Amino acid sequence: MIEQLFGSKTRVKLLQLFYSNPNRPFYVREITRKIDEQINSVRRELANLLSIGIIASDDNKNRLYYEVNQKYEYYDPLVTIFGSGIKASATPKNATSEKSIVPAAAESDDLKAIKALGNVDIALLTGQFTRDEVSGIDFLIVGDVNHTKLSKFIEDLEVKEGKEIRFVYMPVTEYEYRRQVNDRFLNSVLAAKKQVLIDKSGSLNEPAVLSTKKTKKD
């Protein structure tokens, strides 16, 4: 039914990919691999979505990236249909405070795997995932997790993404302390362009303040 409404299977898959991954750009061959469709069909539908304004493109280091256009006038209804409930945030002040960022019924396999690591309070993607190297990491997870499961999750994610993932894990007490002292590293993560997967406490709704204090090197 949904394919009939939106024209093609490839178009529907693209909309699901983009709206489930706000703030995350993809290049053509990466998209083709993720949605498992022919490259010619992908290129054609990308051109269609680009002409409508649903997605935007950016040329970086001789590679063309595509990303959902969050300023598109029908962004909200489309994200309701195709998104996974994941929130995008350019900076913490733009984040929406919610106890549960992703509804259980709409959870992706990756999100389920993250929740299976233990009691996760915060999980977010940045760095290579959003093409913002401000913090120098790609994945932050805060909470009380099983370290063996976390290592396995990162290994699997690296295989899936085809690249090394730079990640940082913090217990809640360390995260809260770093927030309190305006830790430069943590503030750089929170100020970066990111995709928020989990934010149980809504703390990402609080703006980060870049500190000039010297802190312990991470």
Image (cartoon, rainbow, N blue to C red):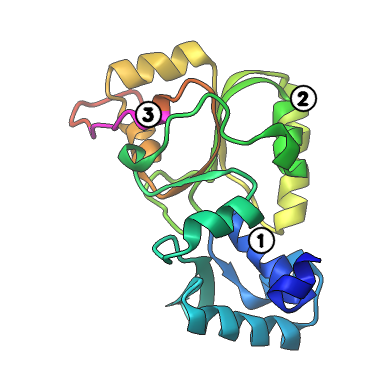
Q: Is residue 154 visible?
A: no
Task: Please tell me in which quadrant of the rendered image residue 125 appears.
Answer: top right
Tell me the kind of residue under disc 3: Lys
Q: Residue 102 appears at what percent x and percent y?
A: 62, 36
Nearest the viewer among 74 and 167 is 74
The stretch in magenta equals: 204-210
User: Quadrant where the N terminus lies?
Assistant: bottom right
Q: Mark 1 = which residue?
A: 17
Q: Is residue 82 left or right of residue 148?
A: left
Q: Residue 217 — which label?
A: 3
Residue situated furthest top in the rendering: 173
Q: Is residue 83 left or right of residue 185?
A: right
- Marks 1 and 2 sit apart, C-alpha to C-alpha, by 29 Å
> Closer to us: mark 1 or mark 2?
1
Q: Earlier in the sequence, mark 1 or mark 3?
A: 1
- Marks 3 and 2 sit apart, C-alpha to C-alpha, by 25 Å
- Marks 1 and 3 sit apart, C-alpha to C-alpha, by 36 Å
Q: Residue 148 — which label?
A: 2
Q: Earlier in the sequence, mark 1 or mark 2?
A: 1
Nearest the viewer among 38 and 154 is 38
Q: Residue 101 appears at what percent x and percent y?
A: 56, 34
Residue in view at x 49 percent, y 28 percent: 98
- Magenta region's main secondary structure? loop
Q: Earlier in the sequence, mark 3 or mark 2?
A: 2
Q: Regarding mark 3 in the picture, which secondary structure is present there?
A: loop
Q: Is residue 101 left or right of residue 29?
A: left
Task: Please tell me in which quadrant of the rendered image residue 166 appears.
Answer: top right
Task: Say above or below: 93 vs 157.
Answer: above
Tell me the kind of residue under disc 2: Thr
Task: Say above or below: 199 vs 24.
Answer: above
